Image (cartoon, rainbow, N blue to C red):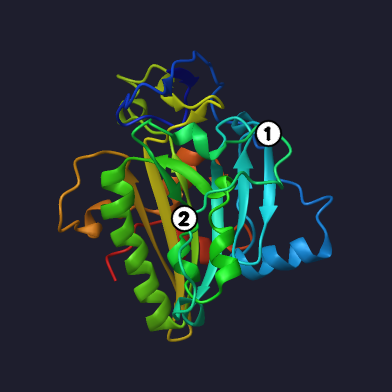
């Protein structure tokens, strides 16, 4: 179990699943300072991929308390990987309808990411823990190109998800976003973890700390929630929709995705990230301020 000082990133519920969950005390300072990601050192190709795959710019950290990170640039996704939690802070994609045509075969060959130089996970960190290696950029978003699908199995793209979430409710959300990509021609997506406890939103119950589980020899942090943001162009105008789903085992079909709608601003507050930083103030108000109705 790891403890964090919290001001915007919290825990909804604690789970200890399997004997391989690692107990480890750790304190983290609260989110608060205005720290932004810098792009110095990116190659021209990396910048091109970021511009192509991340709608209105790569998400920016708004707190130095998120700790050191590394970027991974691939043809199908871009992500920022946490050296503290050994999972991605965010993954961004541009999912075009052509990518969803058949052709690729799912390999299920999870691989340690050779592009990461700092602390990171390996496939064995998840073994016998009760947690799935949960894709953040889904393999199903690359069902046409075998190479692009195989690249979704790097461990930098994984986070611990309970099977009832990963294989059922979250899968339903992923399938829904692919339906939108087909309907509108493409869908930009941001996906990642949240550490959240609702008591920290109330000054009468907040303690400033939260506890999280970690798994494996590499102390991979287990998120309490996951978010997904989708942006599409409808009739010449951009619109967004966002979901936050708890990492629990209580999901039952039908999954009623509308119950998990949330605003992008709320996700920003509880992750310490600024999504779509190139939006104008008016665009930000339209796409981020309020939770969308279900499309």
Residue 234 is situated, as x and y percent measured from the top left of the image, at 42, 81
The answer to which of marks 1 and 2 sits earlier in the sequence is 1
From the image, tell me which residue sits under label 1.
68
Q: Quadrant of residue 289?
A: bottom left
98 lies above or below 40: below
For residue 36, say whether it is visible. Answer: no
Q: Residue furthest bottom?
A: 235
Task: Decide if residue 289 is on the left or right side of residue 294.
Answer: right
Tell me the residue at 34%/29% (across/down).
Answer: 197
Task: Name the residue nearer the viewer: 281 or 5.
Answer: 5
113 lies above or below 218: below
Q: The C terminus appears in which quarter of the rendering?
A: bottom left
Task: Decide if residue 125 is on the left or right side of residue 290.
Answer: right
From the image, tell me which residue sits under label 2.
108
Tell me the residue at 54%/58% (across/down).
Answer: 152
- How many angstroms separate mark 1 from mark 2 (CA)? 29 Å
Q: The N terminus appears in which quarter of the rendering?
A: top left
């Amino acid at each position: 179990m790891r403890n964090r000082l919290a001001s915007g990133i919290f825990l909804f519920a604690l789970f200890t699943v399997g004997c391989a969950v690692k107990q480890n005390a750790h304190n983290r300072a609260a989110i608060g300072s205005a720290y932004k990601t810098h792009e110095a050192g990116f190659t021209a190709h990396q910048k091109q991929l970021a511009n192509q795959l991340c709608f209105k710019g790569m998400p920016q950290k708004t707190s130095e308390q998120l700790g050191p990170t590394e970027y991974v640039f691939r043809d199908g996704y871009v992500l920022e990987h946490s050296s503290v939690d050994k999972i991605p802070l965010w993954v961004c994609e541009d999912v075009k309808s052509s990518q969803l045509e058949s052709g690729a075969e799912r390999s299920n060959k999870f691989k340690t990411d050779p592009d990461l130089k700092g602390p990171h996970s390996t496939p064995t960190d998840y073994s016998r823990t009760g947690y799935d290696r949960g894709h953040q950029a889904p393999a199903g978003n690359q069902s046409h190109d075998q190479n692009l699908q195989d690249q979704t199995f790097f461990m930098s793209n994984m986070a611990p998800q309970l099977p009832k979430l990963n294989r059922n409710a979250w899968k339903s959300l992923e399938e829904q976003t692919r339906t939108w990509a087909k309907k509108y021609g493409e869908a930009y997506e941001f996906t990642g973890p949240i550490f959240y406890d609702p008591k920290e939103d109330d000054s009468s119950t907040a303690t400033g700390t939260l506890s999280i589980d970690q798994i494996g020899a590499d102390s991979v942090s287990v998120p309490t929630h996951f978010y997904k943001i989708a942006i599409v162009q409808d009739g010449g105008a951009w619109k967004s929709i966002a979901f936050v789903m708890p990492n629990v085992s209580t999901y039952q079909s039908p999954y009623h995705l509308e119950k998990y709608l949330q605003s992008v601003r709320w996700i920003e507050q509880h992750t310490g990230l600024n999504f779509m930083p190139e939006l104008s103030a008016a665009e930000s108000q339209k796409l981020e301020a309020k939770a969308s109705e279900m499309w």
